[in-house]
Image (spheres, rainbow, N blue to C red):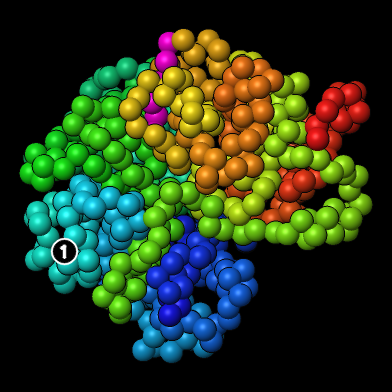
Amino acid sequence: MVILGLTHTASWNPAACLIVDGKLVWFAEEERFTRIKHAPNAFPENAIDFGLKNSGLNINDIDFVSIGFGKAVSALLLSPAIFKPLYDKLWNHLKQLGIKEDKVRFYNHHVSHIASTFPCSGYSSTNILSIDGSGEDCSGILGVYSDFFSDFYSAELINKKSTFKNIIIPATHSWGELWSDVTEILGFYRHSGEGKTMGLAPYGSYDESVLPAFLNSDGCPDNKRYKQFFKDKGYQVKRVYQEQPGVSLEPLSEEGKNTAYTLQSLYNDFLLKTASVLSKSSGLNDFSITGGCGLNCSGNGFLAQQGFVNNIFIQPASHDAGTALGSAVLAHWDITGKPIDTVFDHAYWGSEYSTDYVRKTLIKHNIIYEEVNPSKAAARLLENNYIIGFFQGRAEVGPRALGNRSILANPCHIENLEKVNQIKGRESWRPLSPSILADDYFNIVDTEVISPFMLLALPVSKDWINKIPAVVHVDGSCRPQTVLQETNPVYYNLIKEFKVLTDTPVVLNTSFNLSHEPIVNSPDDALSTFFNSNLDALIIDKFLIIQDNNKGKIIPNRRMDVN
């Protein structure tokens, strides 16, 4: 049986996934194909087409289509005048594909978010936090589940068959909405730049005069009071997703930094309070997190450091892309009565290209290349302080590059933080992340939890702060990736080789893209971004390309062993 899972066209991060006979075989975001960042409100036709071809299927093989959004939506979130055209757009595309109405199933937005976590986490039971900006009639669901497939599967059952009564966060008390408002006030794109606000927070200090604690009894923000507060301050909050906001509050001013810090502190307090309640009620110490706020590394890391937390699973596609997967999980159980047979222990579910395809692409563009061992060549280049693009295997799903569509640098040189930020067009104060061998991870990061998806901000051990300064944030934290040999042997061997050369089992890793574009997806994307940047080298599959950049550099393997 083949199930095609889709986000709704009302969503901001459209994606498609395929579950075949209970196993996930494909999961990718539409933005990677259209090259439009986020691809808001798009129908994921390119992700569908590539996924079917990648999986050896065609449209006639699809038995059911699942949508991670209900048929109706609360007027609090989208007016009928906005939602109806998006709903019609969805159906028009489905009809064009030849999908009949009786094959299509709709599932509650937040239930779909939740279904992308616990059933894929490998946990037998878990506390769940699904928190975002909005989704149908609420902005979050918090609960405890010991048997997902008997607890609930649809909006109708959501409050009737759970082992613990769900806490529903109303749309009027949305954490995601508050984060987006503050992000816009600081001059960043809402629904896109919230990570910048998070990265700014450690530069500030707590100050309720710049952001009062307008919270309800559950610790959630009163959005109406905040809107009035911002209006009284003279801040411009247009809430238009695709429009560059004006700067109401200079980010690097004391008030700007303190606003970001205070927001993060209030959110952390909410997570601690909520998680404590859930854990005490359930007796469980494992947590699964999803929803747009699930991408808040600082909050996740804060929670992970609490003594009552044993394990934490964060869906790497926590934003709305994850509802494509969650709805497909729900549809599979709905139809078969069985859970899917996939543990989400890696994020490499997207596009892949054969060596022959890559070679032909390089020849087509008249690119001079040399064949190398990608792991050894990259390690040698990084040892010699080259900043490189690294393109291997299947693309990651979610906003974090995890070694297959990455920009890599030597973390031992503090100047590489500024250099990489300049190459990508990022603000100079934003942190970059370390990828760390699993064998050495707990020596370098002061924690008891692993971080396979780079979604936890955790303290760097004191012995390592000065050794890897390019990946240590101003507060002594990092956003690490635990690299396992079994899930990515090429990347693991790269870092292992770098450790042999430098005694450092860490490389600097950020997504392979410039600030205005999505992460590269295809070999053509990689070449375009490479030649429009100041990267020193590109390793794509087993092919090495050097860019002069007027630095007088010579081809590395003429002076070093890269094979």
Residue 434, horizontal then vertical, whole percent: 53, 28
Q: Residue at x 34, y 78 (%)?
A: 105
Is 553 inside the magenta-drawn segment?
A: no
Q: Relative to residue 123, is residue 84 drawn left or right?
A: right
Front residue of 53/23: it is: 23
Q: Relative to residue 527, is residue 38 drawn left or right?
A: left
Front residue of 369/373: it is: 373
Q: Residue at x 13, y 54 (%)?
A: 166
In this rendering, the count of numbered labels is 1
Residue 487, horizontal then vertical, whole percent: 52, 46
Q: Which residue is mark 1?
A: 151
Q: Residue at x 48, y 82 (%)?
A: 62
Is 457 inside the magenta-drawn segment?
A: yes
Q: Is residue 35 visible?
A: no
Q: Which residues are magenta?
A: 456-462
Q: Amino acid at mark 1?
A: Asp
Location of residue 474 with respect to 296 vertically, above or below: above
Q: Residue at x 39, y 42 (%)?
A: 295
Residue 253, horizontal then vertical, whole percent: 43, 19
Location of residue 529 with respect to 232 vertically, above or below: below
**Quadrant of the frame with the C terminus:** top right
Q: Quadrant of residue 273?
A: top left
Front residue of 266/213: it is: 266
Q: Is residue 325 visible?
A: yes
Residue 512, horizontal then vertical, whole percent: 64, 42
Q: Relative to residue 514, is residue 540 drawn left or right?
A: right
**Quadrant of the frame with the N terminus:** bottom left
